[in-house]
Image (cartoon, rainbow, N blue to C red):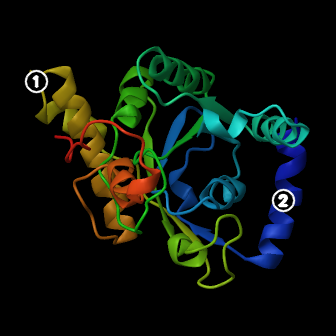
Amino acid sequence: MLYEIAKPVVMAVVRVLWNPTISGTEHIPDRGAVILASNHQAYSDTVFLPGQVRRSVHFLGKSDIFEGRSPLHRLGAAIMRGIRVMPVDRSGGSASRSAIQAGLAVLESGGVLGIYPEGTRSPDGRLHRGKTGVARFALASGAPIVPVAMLGAHEAQRGRRWFPRRRPRIHALVGPPVDVQTVLEECAGLEEAKVLRAVTDAVMDSIHALSGQERVDEYASVVKRRQRPATERPPGPAEPGPAR
């Protein structure tokens, strides 16, 4: 309910201040389950993308957003849930299974699931290696994957934590669905892990074709850890190299 009330109000303000644009929405089905797989350039993506899509979009959000006991934290958590951001514990194991179940529940009800295959915001504006959750959702639900490229968001929010600059204008470019069936046919007989990776790479190929970003075969989270000052790094073993 809060989503339906808040969305037009929030977007009226957003359009006055930033006037984001979107194209290619004809690729998003009018009904039925669908996965919107987008690059992740800035905090503002989670407002500017679903705010411009006619259908309601459910996003998975890191559980940190919902933690905290202060009245302000609790209010923020309530608002995030109201606009259909679902808390996800990204620590792995059973937490990862809970995230999959939450996303599948959206798709099984015929809804729109928004997901950032990179797993976190790009620390440098490049397009990083995708995590296989997007493939798991698609294969388990049969929902089509529609790629999206957020353009200008990284440049507009560079150096700012919350509010992006008014220039460059942020544009969401929606592309045609990823041809998952062809990927599956090419992967016939392969083990599950390789099939998941192949589907995920096909999704990232589609996002790259739309965004034109420099692409790197490394997880964004690994790049972030490497960029973090040594004094802020928790003690532990050496950081891993690019996952294969």
- The spot of residue 134 in percent (x, y) is 40, 36
Q: In this orientation, which residue lies closer to the viewer: 202 or 74?
A: 74
Q: Of helix, strand and loop, which one carries label 2?
A: helix
Q: Is residue 188 above or below residue 234?
A: above
Residue annotated with mark 1? 190
Which amino acid type is marked by label 1?
Leu
Precedes in sequence: disc 2 or disc 1: 2
- The residues bearing labels 2 and 1 have C-alpha atoms spaced at a distance of 46 Å
Mark 2 is surrounded, within 10 Å at the Cα level, by few (under 14), some (14 to 19) or many (20 or more) other residues, namely few
Res 111 seen here: no
Residue 148 relative to residue 190: left or right: right
Q: Residue at x 20, y 39 (%)?
A: 198
| Quarter placement of the N terminus | top right
Q: Residue at x 38, y 48 (%)?
A: 221
Contact, CB < 8 Å: mark 2 with mark 1?
no
| Quarter placement of the C terminus | top left
Residue annotated with mark 2? 10
